[in-house]
Amino acid sequence: MELTVLGKYGPYGKAGGGCSSGYLVKNGDDFIVLDMGCGTLSRLMSQVDVTKIKHIYISHLHYDHTSDLLVFRYLLEELNHTVNIYTHHEDSQWYNILFDHPNFNVVNIDEDTVINIGSTELRFLPMKHTVTDYAIIIKGDKTLCYTGDTLFNDNVLRCFEASDVVLADCSKPRGFTGPHMSIDDAVRLAGQYPKVQIIATHQSADYDPKDDLAGTGIISAEEKTTYTI
């Protein structure tokens, strides 16, 4: 299994080229896109033939995780290509704007949903954020969890218990009190689950966690980088 970071920033990209949240997972012949924030489509196109993309997961409906879905629709129309979108249903205007398109086959998920894609199994866990957010657990030859955006909660522990690698929203500075996990949370989780590799993402444009993560064993996510799970 491979994970490529298309964009790692939130709620907006870094000046000079940083993109907001988006990731590409490859397990065998299966490709799954995780979120499509601003700027991620062009990077996705540089990584893979888009006609091979059939599955996209959207963790929640904030703009920095969804905005490139809108321009992606133009490309899908040109290619006459349809993709499956896995996301939690939300009774909102933004949900309807994003997903009401003939080239999107929307599959609404919740905690009881299990989806099998070839040799890959997808499961989902609710997280704790300012809007409904679900983590995705991707089980193939290895198991990867992506938390989306979240505060620490008991389901984060379930993600770690099930996974070899967790791509986690845990890059905010020590002492941070907003709706995301901080480096304090990341270090505590690394100590509790020493066999699980943490890749810290959803980084702020004005704060690089790399120095504060030095010596912890936690990887600070790097854009345009592919990690072997």
Image: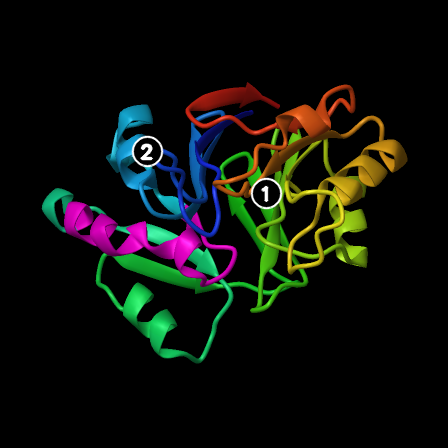
The numbered mark at residue 109 is: none
Residue at the image position 51 percent from the left and 26 percent from the top: 222
Q: In this orientation, which residue lies closer to the viewer: 229 or 27?
A: 229
Say which residue label 2 marks: 44
Q: Point out residue 214 in the picture as x, y percentages from the top left corner.
A: 72, 21
Q: Point out residue 201 in the picture as x, y percentages from the top left corner.
A: 58, 38
Which image quadrant: the C terminus? top right
Residue at the image position 34 percent from the left and 78 percent from the top: 93
Q: Are marks 2 and 1 in contact (CB under 8 Å)?
A: no
Residue neighbourhood size for the residue with mark 1, other residues' Cα within 10 Å, grouped as few (<14), some (14–19), many (≥20): some
Residue 220's image quarter? top right
Give, as a single range, the part of the protein colored magenta. Answer: 56-76
Residue at the image position 54 percent from the left and 46 percent from the top: 116
Say which residue label 1 marks: 121
Q: Point out residue 71 in the picture as x, y percentages from the top left corner.
A: 21, 51
Q: Amino acid at mark 2?
A: Leu
